[in-house]
Image (cartoon, grey):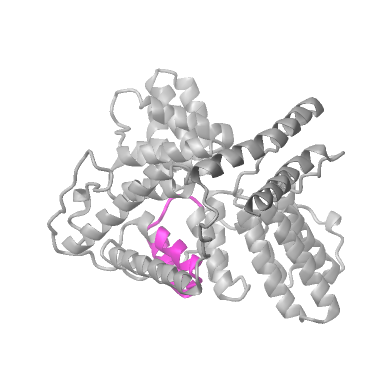
Amino acid sequence: MIWALLAGLALLVVAALVWPLVRDAATPDEGPRDVVVLKDQLAEIDRDLARGVINTTEADALKLEIQRRLLAAARRPLVTVWREGAGLRSALTALLAVAVPLIAFAIYMNLGAPTLKPVVAATPEAQSAQEAQMAGLVEQLAQRMAADPDNIEGWSLLARSYRQMERYEDALEAGRHVLSLNPPGAEPYANFGEMLVTVADGNVSADAQAAFLTALQRDRAEPRARFYLGLAAAQKGDAQSAIAIWRDLTADAPKDAPWLEMVRGQMFQVAQSAAVMPMNVEPKHPLDVLKTDAKAAPVPVPSAPAPKAATTASVPASDPEDITSPDVSAIKEQFSAENLAQIQAMVGALAGRLENDPSDFNGWMMLGRSYMVLRNADGAQKAFEKAISLRPDDLQPKLSYAGAVMSDTNLDSPAPLPANLVKISNDILKLAPDHAEALFVRGLAAFKAGDKKAAARDFTAAKKNADAALSAEIDRWAAQVK
């Protein structure tokens, strides 16, 4: 009886594998699955509104959350689908039809057992235990950050963790502390503004607008800031400004941006309500619409940072040959002996797990950031290299790797810049040609090589999108080019 059952299962598996290969036509790609699902959810909201299942206020709130997720989805790289020819399809069909049953039978004969008990899915109690464990880890992180108020990476991680746990008020406070440290780039300000909108049930407050304006002055192309500033104009009844901002956003967007359709739908909804023809409205960037000057309105931050820990703790022993016991001596002034041991155990456990599961992209990124907190630039570089190998077309691991190399580089040294820093900057520019930090590094490399003309060109380009700190550094080096 068992053999007949196994044979039937094998035939079903073969049929499932072969069927897509023998169909007359391939199903068209619908894009990333999460984007498709989110677009379906938007359509479902419209249908529920039309049937009277939900009111307009509820529909707007639901749409805003889905729109936020669509904007976030734009930051994930798209997957290119490979398609095979007809001849290869036939060969692959025959190979699968023969190989799958044989391989399955061989594996079963070596490892199988008809009396083996089935694996039971995780129980609600086990899931609750996992959630409690996660909450405990986040609380430990919060305690460590209270003792290390100047750690931007740690506070940013804490804000993200709170948000994932839907502890929005705590996430907001952690994000506010991040801004008090004047973090580089636009993302922390866009994140903070978006969190303010979430806490305010979709209302774009003055504080949120200030955060988005700061984000745009650091990165004029930041899509979330542009979208929400358009939404703020619409909420104030200024349909013309909202449409102008969204027309500018959609004009600059990649054709395959997953949020493009959502923004257009929002724009036409506002246009219809205000009896405005969108094509008659001139596209304008939010900074041009609002006529802001070079200094954005300040984002609310705590009046004073938390005090640092005053005690010096004994450092737990570490073994350079053992990745599960990383060196934590660089942060001994900031934590108690107990906390140092916890940090060492957590980072070490993550490193050990990744040795057994090297395909975990997010794990390698977290390990790299952890090593940066431990001021282990070499370990961080190796972790980010692993992440880059898993997602070679993703910009973020390259930026993190460049930051790790920069943290270990003396720019004022007369020696040439490290080759790996120059290479990763060039790789970044292939994905983001206007990236200010990468342009600065390339220009500095040219300057140190004696090519002042190329250096001046890259410094000028970098200056366009640089924040205040980088702009000052560019000016310092540009003065030497003249």
Locate the N terminus by quadrant.
bottom right
Residue 183 colored in magenta in the image? yes
Residue 344: which quarter of the image? bottom left
Q: Position of residue 358 (x, y in %)?
A: 43, 42
Range of magenta residues: 157-186
Q: Main secondary structure of the magenta part?
A: helix
Q: Residue at x 39, y 65 (%)?
A: 177
Number of numbered tags placed on the structure image: 0
Residue 79: which quarter of the image? top right
**Closest to the observer, 422 or 313:** 313
Q: Eyeballing the image, is 347 above or below 17?
A: below
Q: Is residue 290 visible?
A: no
**Closest to the observer, 337 or 16:** 16
Instruction: Specify the farthest residue to the front.
Output: 1
Locate the C terminus by quadrant.
top left
**Closest to the observer, 124 or 350:** 124
Q: Position of residue 346 (x, y in %)?
A: 31, 56
- In this rendering, would 79 be left or right of 216? right
Instruction: Specify the farthest residue to the top.
Output: 450
Q: Residue at x 36, y 58 (%)?
A: 154
- In this rendering, would 246 be left or right of 352? right
Q: Eyeballing the image, is 154 above or below 235?
A: above
Residue 293 colored in magenta in the image? no
- In this rendering, would 453 be left or right of 286? left
Q: Residue at x 41, y 66 (%)?
A: 134
Q: Position of residue 265 (x, y in %)?
A: 79, 61
Q: Position of residue 100 (x, y in %)?
A: 65, 38
Q: Eyeballing the image, is 26 above or below 291?
A: above
Q: Residue at x 74, y 60 (%)?
A: 39
